[in-house]
Amino acid sequence: MAKIHPTALVEDGADLGAGVEIGPFCHVGARVKLAEGVRLLSHVTIAGVTSIGARTVVHPHAALGGEGQIRGNDFADGRLEVGEDCVLREMVSMNVGSRKGGGVTQVGARGYFMANSHVGHDCHVGDDVTFANSVALGGHSQIGNRVIFGGLSAVQQFCRVGAGAMVGGLTGINRDVIPYAMAFGDHAELAGLNLIGLKRRGLTRDAIHALRGAFRAIFYGKGGSTELRAREAKIRWPDVAEVGEIVDFILADAKQPLCLARRRGETE
């Protein structure tokens, strides 16, 4: 049975799972689904066609399921799907999908979203991500699993950030960032691989050496295009799955150009 504070407003039609807690002055819309154990601490607004995964905790003044921030938007059936075991801190905002973007914004499981962070319409965010304070995703962004964003960083619409990447604070992403990289700067450049993240994932020493070699070959190699060097790297390191993941990311059909490495001779 749900526990609802007397000052909260839960509209008829809302679907509340077992053990849901809705704190003071929250507003839950008629088309909202809260899975078991979801906790809305206070002053939370959840609107639209929004589903929140089990045991997710939402802190005060978060606004979830609002319309995409698009001029002239007339799409009433956009959805927001948030995975289980997430933490959404104060004033986090997440918008539903738009007609042109496929209609759904998806956020994976176990994400930690610090105060004021924003997920725009039609974004697809993976599992186990960390957003520091005031991180902003433009519409249609694609964020892989285990990505870490430093505070006040921002992603331009349609950009991709690959799995395991780390984006530094105050960084502006206007090009696609490959998996497992570190990206820093007013307009981001790759500063090498996210070695700490790779070690925490338990990658072997040999796999990390292969990734370093592939990074250098792709971004600092001579002759041919980045795409050609990427294909050659996949042939050279066929047994390292993470090298293949980076190459597939580079070769995928994308709407933004690729974020390249700083030209300084060495990556780390």
Image (cartoon, rainbow, N blue to C red):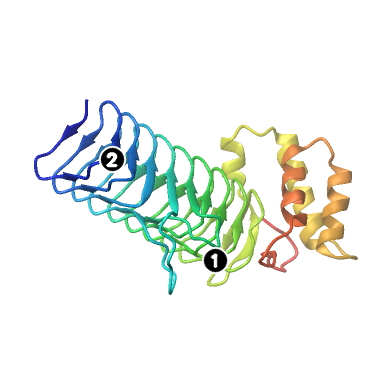
Residue 203 as seen in the image, left or right of residue 6: right
Residue 200 in which image quadrant:
top right
Question: Does 260 sit left or right of 152 as displayed?
Answer: right
Q: Which mark is residue 157?
A: 1
**Residue 64, horizontal then vertical, whole percent:** 34, 52
Q: Residues within 10 Å of mark 1 (few under 14, many from 20)?
A: many
The residue identified by callout 2 is: 14
Q: Residue at x 34, y 39 (%)?
A: 33
| Residue at the outermost left position | 6
Q: Position of residue 206 (x, y in %)?
A: 75, 35
Q: Which quadrant of the rendered structure holds the N terminus?
A: top left
Closer to us: 122 or 152: 122
> In the figure, residue 221 lies in which quadrant?
bottom right
Disc 1 vs disc 2: Cβ atoms closer than 8 Å? no
From the viewer's side, name the closer residue of 248 and 212.
248
Number of marks in the rendered image: 2
Helix, strand or loop at label 1? It is loop
Residue 230 vertical placement versus 73 (above, below) = above
In this rendering, would 166 be left or right of 207?
Answer: left
Q: Quadrant of the C terminus?
A: bottom right
Residue shown at 59%/46% (left/top)?
A: 164
**Callout 2 environment at 10 Å: few (<14), some (14 to 19), or many (20+)?**
some
Q: Secondary structure at mark 2?
A: loop
- Among numbered discs 1 and 2, the one appearing first in the sequence: 2
Of the pair 227 and 141, the residue shown nearer to us: 141
In the rendered image, the vertical position of residue 164 relative to residue 94, given as above or below: above
The residue type indicated by label 1 comes to Gln
The amino acid type found where label 2 is placed reads: Ala
Residue 69 is situated, as x and y percent measured from the top left of the image, at: 41, 67
